[in-house]
Image: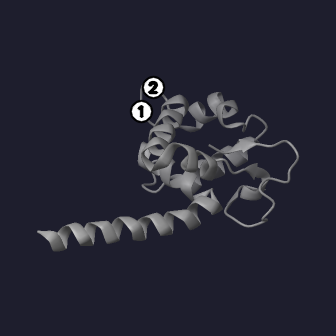
Amino acid sequence: MAGGNGNGNGNGNGNGIGIGNTRVSDFEDLLPVMAERLGGEGLIKELCSGFELLMDKERGLITLESLRRNAAVLGLQDMREDELVSMLREGDLDGDGALNQMEFCVLMFRLSPDLMEDSWFWLQHVLQEEEQLSSKK
């Protein structure tokens, strides 16, 4: 998962989605490294574990309170309240003010410019495999 690198240089590309006034480039992008080491299935398991660490145990969702309480897990302990709110809004696809597991995983991919590029490759790869399997039936 993304973690603060402390020097403000991040991955150095200067591109990406912003969270509040913070740019993705302000974070070290570890997802591509994790994907390479763990593989696709391992990365998804790791993201699910990250979700469970951040979620409100009673609601089964990441709320502003649970994110505020657990922000240090992602190296985001220095984020301001408005930045945490922006992060939730950025990922909240269904408008309920919290992140479910799918929304969290989508947000983590969106915040990783390198992984987004790789994901197009893997999507095409999976679609080709599906097409090959369908043609064999």
Q: In x, y percent, where is residue 27? A: 75, 49
Whether residue 61 appears in this view of the structure is yes
In the drawing, what numbered circle is on residue 57?
Answer: 2
Instruction: Give the amino acid at mark 2.
Output: Lys
Q: In x, y percent, where is residue 80? A: 76, 42
The residue closer to the viewer here, 136 or 116, is 136
Asked which secondary structure carries label 1, the reply is: loop
Residue at the image position 71 percent from the left and 48 percent from the top: 83
Are the residues at dot 2 and dot 1 in contact (C-beta closer than 8 Å)?
yes
Residue at the extreme front of the image, as rendered: 136
Instruction: Give the amino acid at mark 1.
Output: Gly
Q: Label 1: how many residues lie within 10 Å, few (<14), some (14-19) or many (20+)?
A: some
The residue closer to the viewer here, 50 or 32, is 32
Q: Which residue is mark 1?
A: 60
Residue at the image position 41 percent from the left and 33 percent from the top: 60
Residue at the image position 79 percent from the left and 53 percent from the top: 10
Q: Label 2: how many residues lie within 10 Å, few (<14), some (14-19) or many (20+)?
A: few
- The answer to whether 118 appears left or right of 130 in the picture is right
Asked which secondary structure carries label 2, the reply is: loop
The relative height of residue 83 versus residue 76 in the rendered view (above or below) is below
